[in-house]
Image (cartoon, helix red, strand yellow):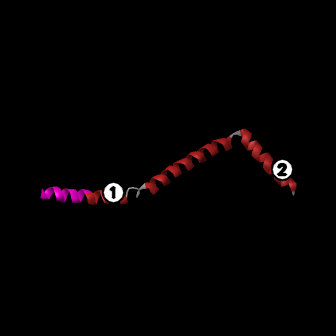
Amino acid sequence: MRWARTARRALETRWRTLRRTAEAGMATAEYAIATLAAAGFAGLLLLILRSNEVRGFLLGIIRQALQVG
């Protein structure tokens, strides 16, 4: 029975450690997801800005802004 108490104590210690450090790696995972989302959004913006319609629209806005002065 002595080994059972030792094993139980070891498991309790391990469980306390796990509960205390359960979210230790969450920041890294969150940064990875945010980085992937930002890269995807940048790719989407790049595709949109390369289209002729959007390019013409943006150039029109810039020309109009430069003519105001």
Q: Quadrant of the N terminus?
A: bottom left
Front position in the image: 26 or 34: 26
Name the spot of residue 36 as percent of width and height, x first.
52, 48
Name the spot of residue 37 as percent of width and height, x first.
55, 47
Q: Earlier in the sequence, mark 1 or mark 2?
A: 1
- The label shown at residue 64 is 2
In terms of image quadrants, where is residue 43? Answer: top right
Front position in the image: 23 or 56: 23
In the image, taking residue 59 as reference, residue 34 lies left or right, namely: left
How busy is the neighbourhood of tag 2: few (under 14 within 10 Å), some, or many (20 plus)?
few
Q: Amino acid at mark 1?
A: Leu
Q: Is residue 18 above or below residue 40?
A: below
Name the spot of residue 56 as percent of width and height, x first.
76, 42
**CA gap, disc 1 to disc 2?**
61 Å
* Label 1 sits on residue: 18
Name the spot of residue 54 as percent of width and height, x first.
72, 42
| Residue extent of the magenta highlight | 1-11
Q: Amino acid at mark 2?
A: Gln
Magenta highlight on residue 10 = yes
- Going 44% across and 55% down the picture, which residue do you hit? 26
